[in-house]
Image (spheres, rainbow, N blue to C red):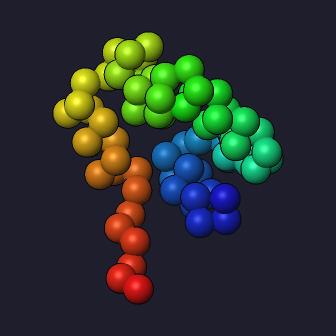
Amino acid sequence: MARLRPKLEAAGIDAAHYRAVFGAPRHAMATVLAVLRARHGSVEGFLTERAGLTADVLIELRTRLTTARPPR
C-alpha cells in the first residue's frame, strides 16, 4: 500500500477509501481463491466462464498487473 499510495493520490483517488480492497486478510483471499478453483477449475476459468473475459483480455491483464519472477 505504501508504494501504491502516491500513484493513487496522483490520480486523484483517496487511498484510504480503497484500503480494505488492497488489505484483505490472507485467509480471506485464500478462501476466495479456493472457492473459485473448486467451482470453476481456476481463477481463469471463472474470469472466462462467468465474467465473460476473452483470452486476449486475460493476457493483457496479466501483462499489466504482474511482474516476471526473477531467475533463481
Q: Is residue 51 left or right of residue 4?
A: left
User: How far across and down, in percent of the image, does residue 9 sit?
Assistant: 58, 51
Q: Is residue 70 left or right of residue 35?
A: left
Rendered position, 55 above or below 5: above
Q: Residue farthest to the left?
A: 56
* Placement of the C terminus among the 4 image quadrants: bottom left
Q: Is residue 57 left or right of residue 12?
A: left
Rendered position, 16 above or below 53: below
User: How far across and down, in percent of the image, does residue 16 sit?
Assistant: 75, 44
Rendered position, 21 above or below 47: below
The quadrant where residue 54 appears: top left
Q: Nearer the viewer, residue 15 or 70?
A: 70
User: How far across and down, in percent of the image, does residue 2 sit?
Assistant: 67, 65
Number of numbered labels in the structure image: 0
Rendered residue at 66%/59% (across/down)? 1
Q: Nearer the viewer, residue 37 or 69?
A: 37
Rendered residue at 64%/27% (across/down)? 35
The quadrant where residue 56 appears: top left
Rendered residue at 55%/31% (across/down)? 37
Residue 19 visible to the viewer: no
Residue 32 visible to the viewer: yes
User: How far across and down, in percent of the image, does residue 41 sit?
Assistant: 47, 29
Rendered residue at 49%/23% (across/down)? 40
